[in-house]
Amino acid sequence: QVQLVESGGGLVQAGGSLRLSCAASGRFFNNYAMGWFRQAPGKEREFVGTIGWSGGNTAYADSVKGRFTISRDIAENTVYLQMNSLKPEDTGVYYCAGVRSLGTLYRSKDEYDYWGQGTQVTVSS
């Protein structure tokens, strides 16, 4: 069983930065690929990025590539989403998610087994 808790959301002006954290508890965190998703009001939850269990491989949505970076601290059981050059269209509730995987990265939310409660990110223009 993996429990996930996000933090770090808030209100920021366009062009600013935020760093989200996802703290994981559970014995098998190291065997999990982790993903970040977001959901704007009235829209589907969409893929933002993902990182493999070792932190050595990542993948991003085209809309955030070059602006967002995912990393993980295995010792601290924490995954981060560094968001730079934020735009108003980045506004939404951001969720971290976990799926047991020793290599494959997943972009579909349907592949993930565990979810956090979400943290709100609002980017003003």
Image (tube, grey):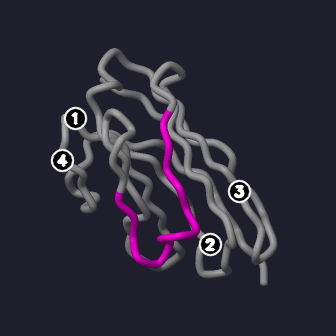
Amino acid bearing label 3: Leu
Q: Amino acid at mark 1?
A: Arg
Instruction: Find the magenta span and give its range.
Output: 59-72
Q: Which residue is mark 1?
A: 100
Up the image or down, 19 lies above or below 16; here it is above
Sooner in the amino-acid sequence: mark 2 or mark 3: 3
Apparent side of residue 3 relative to residue 89 in the rendered image (left or right): left
For label 4, count other residues whose C-alpha is less than 10 Å away and answer few (under 14), some (14-19) or many (20+): few
- Secondary structure state at the residue bearing disc 2: loop
The percent coordinates of residue 61 (x first, y second) are 39, 70
Label located before the other in sequence (2 or 1): 2
Q: Quadrant of the C terminus?
A: bottom right
Q: Which residue is label 4 attached to?
A: 104
Going from the N terminus, do you reach mark 4 or mark 2 first? 2
Labelled pair 1, 4 in contact (Cβ < 8 Å): no
- What residue is drawn where x is 36% and y is 43%? 34
Q: Which mark is residue 91?
A: 2
